[in-house]
Image (cartoon, rainbow, N blue to C red):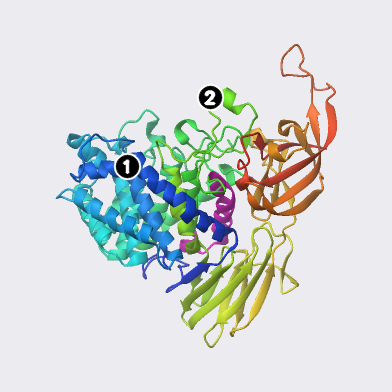
Amino acid sequence: MDGPVLPSPGALSAHRPPPDTGVRVTGGLFGRWLDVNRAGSIPLALHHLETSGALGNLRIAAGLESGSFRGPVYADSDVHKMLESAAWQLQHTDHDTELSTFLDEGARLLARAQEDDGYLDSHYQVAEPERRYARLVDSHELYCAGHLLQAAVAVHRTTGGTELLTVARRLADHLCAVFLDDPGPGLDGHPEAETALVELYRVTGDERYLALATRLVERRGHGLVGRHKHGTRHRLDHLPVRSAPSVTGHVVRALYLEAGAVDVAVETGDKELLAASAARWTDMAATRTALTGGLGSRQVGEVFGERYELPPDLAYNETCASAASIQWSWRLLLATGEGRYADLLERTLYNAFAAARSADGRTYYKGNPLQRRPDHAEAVGDPRCRDEWFYSACCPPSVTRLVASLPHYATTTADDTLFLHLYAPMRIACTLPTGQVALRVETEYPWDGTVRITVEDAPGGDWTLALRVPPWSARTRLDGEPVTPDAQGRLLLRHAWRAGDEVVLDLDMTPRLTAAHPRIDALRGSVAVERGPLVYCFEQADQPAGTDVDELALPAGAELRVTHVSDLPGVGRTVRIEAGAETVRAPHRDGLPYLSPDTPLERRPATATAVPYFQWDNRGDGAMRVWVPVTY
């Protein structure tokens, strides 16, 4: 089973996806997500490719239909991302006629729509043929091309098919002819082609694709994107990639650029470029990341905002940004082998990313705030509930393609060590230098912290099984005995393993209160509830009558009580957490919402119930908050 990122044999990469790997999810939450992906999300997305005009645009470009272009200029990317989604999803089923047909027909349609010189972008072919590469700051031409290249790589790796790969190579050859030599027409305002070109290089071995990816990365920060109303920072053209100290501007653009920079760095052996990207990741994690792993403090411009600007209610935390964050963290994990990247990847996956899609897989959020007040719809004119599709529909297919490729992010290898980064019921088979290894993983993670790993096949001689211990596990046990992970947060178990050997990892799932850094003004004096990898939220639907979520406060030493629920209507399996809390009310002085510091407040005891943040808004619209004031 292949995945989206496979460094070449000579790459500067501390870890690699296992060679000849087979990772099969056999149940649990990941299994549910994959089932929902296939049964709900993907069929609905294919329907919307038709109703939105995305497929129709390509048919017009191919001369199969007549009409006008519909949708945003980057509508092609929705088709490309769904082709990639379908390819990865096919790995989880022995036969799927619908998805196979979509891949075959999609490849033929794109081949027919492609121009003789390799150019392929239906907006500019149909609506503005005279403006090819004329306004790269907003055109998304290379962005769309990048998603097509990634789709072609996915189809080739999963099915062996070459028709879409041929289209992708012709397009990439065209891009090399136009952009590889000076002076070139400039840079696309939305990075994406960089990482895609590197992956196409990894599949084909054509060094021109790596050279173009390198050129696109190196030319950033030199004013080549063009003027934009949001300025050069928004379009990531204010500083060269090697010298920019922090991520800034449009979040998704920035993270796609970082993924491309890491890919270029590992394939060219450029340690300086890799270190620059890693330094920005460190700053981002420390100063610009929501508790859920969400990124993007401001909906206006979809940007990062300032350091420690992390409002719970106004933050955007776009779904595409969460997917892009996972992609960047994964590449840095492969490049460096450092455990901190897996820690943020898991946090983002289970919280900011997972919250974007409804439990039935049919609706999505673009933005994922950490608080919603009961009168939100009245205030903004839109309840911002999830929707099936959007005019700018980047987020739904970003979810489906990442979920479809989830097993890719579970394991890596380094020499004769097999690392487990994500825990789910699954079977793993891969080849180490010592021979074939097969494991069975049994767990109810993230609801329970026990992970049982059974060796089903092992070569002769010693090899190492490395188990990730997340930083929140305060008391970790292995086979019943207390253990301490190494500096990278791992347990390295080296043995001459034999079939039938078993280890049991017990992670500490004690619920905990978390406080924000004091420089985060919007969260000062507040706490949040976490358990294992999950961030919790207080949703109005779970509170007793008369208890308003917006009036809740938690004592600093609140007792947190865990209740397992096998099937919460609209949500499914979950774990609730109850806490002794209170509601805090106050009068309005002079009709204004301000008081003197010594004004007595009305406090009443209450029981507050929290559910995992990723499961919110599956039981009707209502108020929600992650952070609540703390009382002492």
Q: Is residue 333 magenta?
A: yes
Residue holding disc 2 = 381
Report the amino acid beneath label 2. Answer: Gly
Confirm whether residue 209 shows in the render: yes
Please give the name of the residue rendered at 25% of the width and 63% of the height, measured from the top-left corner: 206
In this rendering, would 159 be left or right of 258? left
Label 1 CA crowd tier, 10 Å (few <14, some 14–19, many 20+): many
Q: Residue 68, relative to residue 39: is it above or below? A: above
User: Disc number at residue 242?
Assistant: none
Quarter of the image where one finds residue 310 = top right
Q: Secondary structure at mark 1?
A: helix
**378 above or below 527?**
above
The quarter of the image holding the N terminus is bottom left
Q: Quadrant of the C terminus?
A: top right
Q: Residue at x 65, y 29 (%)?
A: 374
Which residue is pictured at 53% across the width and 78% down the height?
438
Q: Could you tell me residue 359's position as x and y percent?
A: 57, 48
Measured as percent of width and height from the top left, residue 443 is found at 64, 66
Give the labeled residue for mark 1: 54
Q: Position of residue 192 (x, y in %)?
A: 36, 48
Labels 1 and 2: the sequence-earlier one: 1
Taking the view exactly as shown, the residue that stands out farthest to the left is 116
Q: Quadrant of residue 452?
A: bottom right
| Whole-percent x, y for residue 133 in the image | 23, 39
Secondary structure, magenta segment, majority class: helix
Which sits in the foreground, 315 or 270?
315
419 or 258, which is in the foreground?
A: 419
Which segment is the magenta one? 331-356
